[in-house]
Amino acid sequence: MPNPTQGPGFDFNTQVGVRLRADEVTVEANGLTFVPVGDIDLSGDPGYPASGDEPGYKTLELIWRQHDVEMRINLYFASDDQDWWISEIRTYDGNDPGDWITMTDEQARTPLGQAFAGDIAAGPLRLTGLELEAFVPRSTTCDGSGAPGQIHLELVGPEPIRGELLEGLGTGYGMTVAVLDAATCEPLRPEGIEFVAATAPEAVATVDADGPVYSPEWAPDELRVSLSFVGVGETTLTIDAVDQETQNVLASVDISVVVDEGGNP
């Protein structure tokens, strides 16, 4: 998601339940000051909510080029049934190729449903005049125009899905697709439905062998799909909901995927 809004400050909205607004965002690394402006790739892992003793998880991730090097900021969020917080922060170190600087001190613990306001200083990263929201309800493309019981499928998170090939490493991406009632836009627990996924062209990305995975034990709208990135370029991931008895396609969604040449893992 390139080019988020920048006016007097910064406004990064991942569309997966994390939004960061700040007066200043800087990384002091390798004797240089880096500021995320210009052509920025903004993304975020939609993760999952807290369940029992397992904390919830989401990310906010920024990539841009400045001073002739690639820079990155990754914020990792966790939650329980009361609060959310930043569990880890990573930035690149200002070198080419870049390497990670990692900070694991908890930051910004805040009650669920509320925004954190203040400043954060973590290693080389400074966030000033910060207003930060995490685990907020996501927006949806469902407009309620379907028939009751009709399935609506949509990607949870920003599109296109962006990935990269890292030299010497298998790389991939796990995503969540919402399964909704097209009339009410509420989560739908499908019965008698098989989910099928494929990419075209497969020279860029392939669907992992297990295909789409759905479990009644998860949140009712969660269909999980994993891709493996195999080449640089663009492809389309198509997910169909198929009636197991008639083999008719009941719903379908096309998701754009862009894979770039990666740098240092």
Image (tube, rainbow, N blue to C red):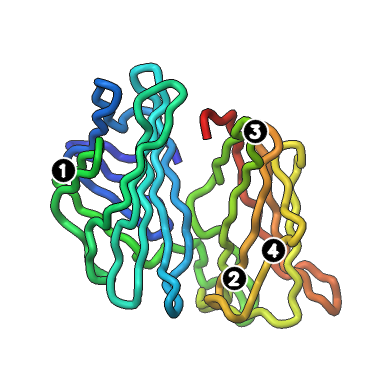
Left or right placement of residue 201 versus residue 170 in this view:
right
Write down the quadrant of residue 107 in the picture.
bottom left
Label drawn at residue 179 = 2
Q: Which residue is at the front of the view, 226 or 245?
A: 226
The amino acid type found where label 1 is placed reads Thr
Mark 2 and mark 4: span between their CA atoms? 12 Å
Q: Which mark is residue 128?
A: 1
Question: CB of mark 1 within 8 Å of CB of mark 4?
Answer: no
> What whole-number distance in Å separates the C-alpha atoms at marks 1 and 4?
41 Å
Which residue bears the numbered disc 4?
212
Local crowd size for mark 2, using a 10 Å CA cut-off: few (<14), some (14–19), many (≥20): many
**Lower position in the chain sequence, tag 3 or tag 1:** 1
Q: Earlier in the sequence, mark 3 or mark 4?
A: 3
Residue 78, x across and y down, in percent? 36, 63
Q: Does the rendering let one see residue 3?
A: no
Check disc 3 and give the amino acid type. Answer: Gly
Q: Secondary structure at mark 1?
A: strand
Q: Find residue 160 and report its image quarter.
A: top right
Q: Which mark is residue 168?
A: 3
